[in-house]
Amino acid sequence: WLSIFGEKKIMNFFGFGQSATIDIDVNAVEGRELVPVKSAVDVVEKQPLFFDGENLSGSVAIHLKQAGKKFEHSGIKVEFLGLIELAYDRSTEHDFISLVKELAPPGELTKKTTNFTFEFKNAEKTYETYRGINAKLKYVVRVTIIRRMSDVVMEKELTVHSLATYPELNNSIKMEVGIEDCLHIEFEYNRSKYHLRDVIVGKIYFLLVRIKISNMELSIIRRETTSAHGSQGAYTENKTITKYEIMDGAPVKGESIPIRLFLAGFDLTPTMSNVNKKFSVKYFLNLVLVDEEDRRYYKQQEITLWRKAQPMSKAKRLQTSTLQHMKQ
């Protein structure tokens, strides 16, 4: 993915004359969490974290290369955009949120630095930020200085997390897998829906074992499905998030093996269904048995992942209480 990361973009027509750079500062509030994000060129930057309905405010500074020299423009605007990029159509950004405010009417700038502030109250942030194989969902604050020949544009990206409540129905998963007269295995997981810092607990029972199994492994698979043009169907990509061996050696009839998989620390997102009719993200537990002749037996089960609100630290609660008291 080719994206604009950082805080400056410089336009200098033909290498001479007046030019401008733009700095964007989004919600410079002490205590706001910063999320590490890896760019397309493997550079890690920290983005401010927001949630649906939060106010989005900040400041814009426009710096001129030469103070006192006129910099004419046809208006300056700031936009808050929710965008989806798809790999098969990288030239098009599909926006699902588009808010705009005017910072300055047509005119000219002469000061070395000109400052503006902006605020989008109760800004809707419908979906969680997502960076996948064929789909990317992002939120940006975009500042544009409109000019006759070529606009000066700067973007600042931010991260959005979508919180959910605990599912009311969360049944356990029980399944059987086998080969007639050779292998009969039953496995059970404690739930079908897990939050992103949850623990998957389960057990595998060997009811019939007449083939020599050498090892068994459990993996989490992320399946990303993106819509395609017209009637071309859809593109599906699978990515193994983690894989670990849960058994090494031959089991015997009646044996059971416990499973305990901690989700915290893995690169997981909530399950996402038909996001803006562009893409979906599903997760599966994939159980693989390998016999001594290296034949593989698979069993896959879909699970639902969701993001749970984290409890506030004592310091954060104190800070929030202080800010609320100051506003009163």
Image (cartoon, rainbow, N blue to C red):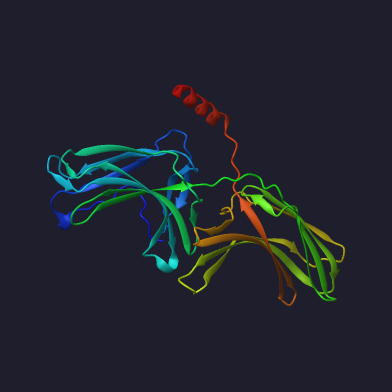
Q: Is residue 137 left or right of residue 166?
A: left
Locate residue 145, reporting x and y percent: 24, 48
**Which residue is rendered at x = 63% and y = 44% of the image?**
165
- In the rendered image, the residue lying farthest to the bottom is 293
- Can residue 317 be seen by looking at this rendering? yes
Name the foreground residue: 205 vs 91. Answer: 91
**Which residue is rendered at x = 49% and y = 49% of the image?**
126
Q: To which quarter of the image does residue 23 belong?
A: top left
Locate residue 176, reporting x and y percent: 79, 66
**Which residue is rendered at x = 15% and y = 48% of the image?**
18
- Can residue 242 be seen by looking at this rendering? no
* Vertical position of residue 162 compared to residue 117: above or below: below
* Vertical position of residue 306 compared to residue 314: above or below: below
Locate residue 144, reporting x and y percent: 28, 49
Q: Is residue 141 left or right of residue 52?
A: left
* Vertical position of residue 289 compared to residue 9: above or below: below
Locate residue 124, reporting x and y percent: 46, 45
Quadrant where the N terminus sits is bottom left
